Amino acid sequence: MKKTIEIAIIISMFIFLTGFQEASKPVAGHGGRAIAGHEGNVVEVINVEGYTYVEIESDGKNTWLAAPSFKVERGDRLMTSKGIKMGNFESRFLTRKFPVIWFVGTVEVIGKDKPEAKPAPESTWKKVDTVESPAFGSINKADDGYTLEELIDYKKKLENKEVTLRAMVVKVSGNIMGNEWYHVQDGTGGDASLDLIITTKDKVNAGEIVLITGKLGLNRDFGSGYRYEMIIEEATLKVEK
């Protein structure tokens, strides 16, 4: 019992010092400048005095999390900060031992039917999910820039450096953790239709040709299944007429 109380005090101090954010506030990540954490669908919820315990499922793997009390239901989508991992943790409130549980300080509950955020009325941005790949050789290489094929060839030399690329936006993934995520192609690579992920604050439409400038990252793992061999982050996009 004494050990359990001591563990609870340690966890409480951690959450107090790191700062718990209520549900619906965004969890930084995917370019949001914070460590990637946990993400999945809620399959079980247990509320006790001062705490909410949730079990989430992601890619067939279940994970238990705990945080200061917040509202959540089975079926909701949950994203959290990384937190502290505890092994063989015994809850005195639940009289239950968890082989592994994460105590987290930041939580976002997406909800089952949360409507997609829409642009302001004055915005000309319209979300178009996908378009066909550009034809081979149809997009001119940017001045002082690279083709996508060249970025792949020189990626080791260009890692963490600012690069420029002209390409077509072929897929709009929407706002993920504070950034817009786009798939772009430039017609290089022959039939392979080489594809690259771009993260940015800028909003553009699928089908538009854009001049992209940003930092090239390699082998980036954001957690929750977001893993990329090559990506351009914090990009600026200029739509070309």
Image (cartoon, helix red, strand yellow):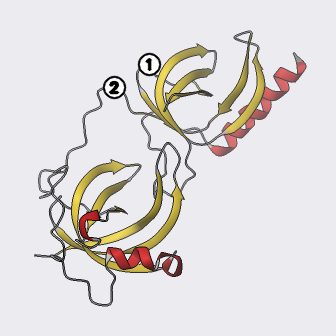
- Amino acid marked by disc 2: Lys
The residue at which mark 1 appears reads as: 73
- Amino acid marked by disc 1: Glu
Residue at the bottom extreme, as displayed:
144
- Looking at the image, residue 42 sits to the left or right of residue 115; the answer is right
Rendered view: 201 above or below 68: below
- Residue 92, percent across and down? 76, 13
- Residue 230, percent across and down? 45, 65
Rendered view: 203 above or below 17: below
- Residue 209, percent across and down? 17, 71
Mark 1 in CB contact with mark 2 (< 8 angstroms): yes
Q: Which mark is residue 150?
A: none
Q: Residue at x 56, y 22 (%)?
A: 54
Q: Residue at x 14, y 53 (%)?
A: 126
Rendered view: 78 above or below 204: above
Residue at the right extreme, as displayed:
2
- Looking at the image, residue 100 sits to the left or right of residue 197; the answer is right
Q: Quadrant of residue 169?
A: bottom left
Q: Quadrant of residue 85?
A: top right
Q: Residue at x 29, y 64 (%)?
A: 192
